[in-house]
Amino acid sequence: MDKLIIEGGVKLKGEVTVSGAKNSVLPILAATLLTDDACVIKDVPNLRDTNTMLKILRALGKNAELDKGIVTVSSLKNTNFIADYKLVSTMRASFCVLGPLLGKLKKAKVSLPGGCIIGVRPVDLHLKGIKCLGADVSIESGYVVAKASRLRGSRMYLGGVYGSSVLATDNVMMAAVLAQGKTVIESAACEPEVVDLAEFLNKMGAKIKGHGTPVIEIEGVRHLHGATHTIIPDRIEAGTLMIAALITRGDICIKNVLFQHLGALIDKLEEAGASITKKDTTVRVRCKRRLRAVNITTLPYPGFPTDMQAQIMSLMSVTPGISVITEKIYPDRFMHVAELNRMGAHIQREGPHAIVEGVKGLSGAPVMASDLRASACLALAGLVAHARTSISRIYHLERGYENLEGKLERLGAKIWREKE
């Protein structure tokens, strides 16, 4: 197992290109289960999670290979309707095969994904949605078993305790495209990744409108055909690189960015004093003056993304003043606080709030990544820390960032891998 070593203190400069969005590619790959025709997906990031989804597709009867950013999916045999625990348990997002399996085969047996280090994330909204479509659902030995002689369109409300659910919206949308009649999803997730999935489904012959708004309408069709689709850029990777520029007081041009997907983040970074300019799909991020502390509250899109909470906490930990970071999506998503404090940060957690008092500098230390975004948070802290930072369990980083250390190294960072 590898660990990541960072020698901090280098101002990052240069150009870097953002990869395709992890949170788009996983449900889009799952959607290929809705057709027997071949599908071609472009700008696919080479991630641990991507390869897990490809393994799941193969186990379900598909031929799926990733080559130079392109995945071609075709049918090898009759599709298997059972998604095994050994694969689903390694990646929560793999639960999104439930919708397409049910839609195409009218039956599905998918392992429950279980808990998560960032907090319990139940699947009740997923099950509520497919029940509204007429499926009989039961839990048997840790598996969700869903059956329906015919799915029928329905009007449903998918709002949860902490707002809308991206994965539940994805699952229900994929099941509904082959249902009889019209489905209306109220309190649907509005994230760009949901829109990307809907656009892919429409290319396959689905009839979806309203995606990107809280009300999605789906007119069921009899069958879907193959399609070719290009994944949108990863807005969370783009945001992480923007913070890398600011935390090191550097100057970075970030390519393949959809500026409109980053409104809440850019607003807060500019409030903190960042200089951010855009031209087409390139964003330049600089730190021209002293940054100041800002308060953050995570919310469903278009609010500030929970997937950027840990990274901006790294930035606020070395920004003068006191900031309050409130987590309204996953209130337990603060595992990185203890590790940042090991590096000299002054952060106190109070329920769903983290009170961050900016310090003059961080000190390198051995730290441990607890989840995907926490690993990015610690890497950012390491970039600005005095002396050496050693980050273990970086397989979390590999789940959602394509060669992040290589991209940072090309920007001037002193970063490399060593065996544990």
Image (spheres, helix red, strand yellow):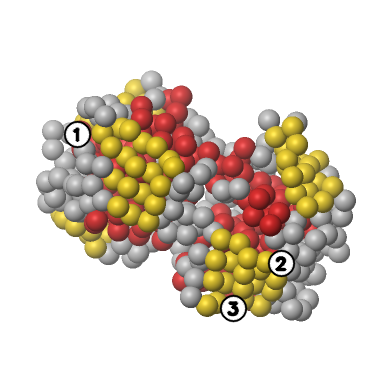
Give the quarter of the image for residue 397.
top right
Q: CA distance from mark 3 to mark 2?
A: 15 Å
Q: Name the N-terminal-most of marks 2 and 1.
A: 2
- Identify the residue at horizontal 32%, vertical 26% (top origin): 82
Residue 388 is left or right of residue 300, and the answer is: right
Q: Nearer the viewer, mark 3 or mark 2?
A: 2
Instruction: Using a 10 Å C-alpha cutoff, classify the residue at mark 1 as few (fewer than 14 neighbours), some (14 to 19) or many (20 or more).
Output: many
- Furthest toward the top, the residue is 141
* Element assignment for label 3: strand
Q: Residues within 10 Å of mark 3 (few under 14, many from 20)?
A: few
| Nearest to the observer: residue 127 or residue 87 | 87
Q: Earlier in the sequence, mark 1 or mark 3?
A: 1
> Are discs 3 and 2 less than 8 Å apart at CB?
no
- Residue located at (46% from left, 35% from top): 52
Q: Which amino acid, by three-letter code, is at mark 3? A: Thr
Q: Which residue is mark 3?
A: 277
274 with respect to 343 (left or right): left
Q: Is residue 111 above or below residue 270?
A: above
Residue type highlighted by circle 1: Lys
Residue that mark 1 sits on: 106
Q: Quadrant of the N terminus?
A: top right
Residue at horizontal 24%, vertical 27%? 77
Q: Is residue 417 left or right of residue 65?
A: right
How far across and how far down the image is residue 369, in percent?
68, 41
Label 2: few (<14), some (14–19) or many (≥20) C-alpha neighbours in 10 Å: many
Residue that numbered label 2 is attached to: 13
Amino acid type, mark 2 = Lys
CA gap, disc 2 to disc 1? Answer: 53 Å
Separation (CA) of disc 1 from disc 3: 49 Å
Which quadrant holds residue 203? bottom left
Q: Nearer the viewer, mark 1 or mark 3?
A: 3
Query: Relative to 147, does residue 233 appear above or below in the rendering?
Result: below
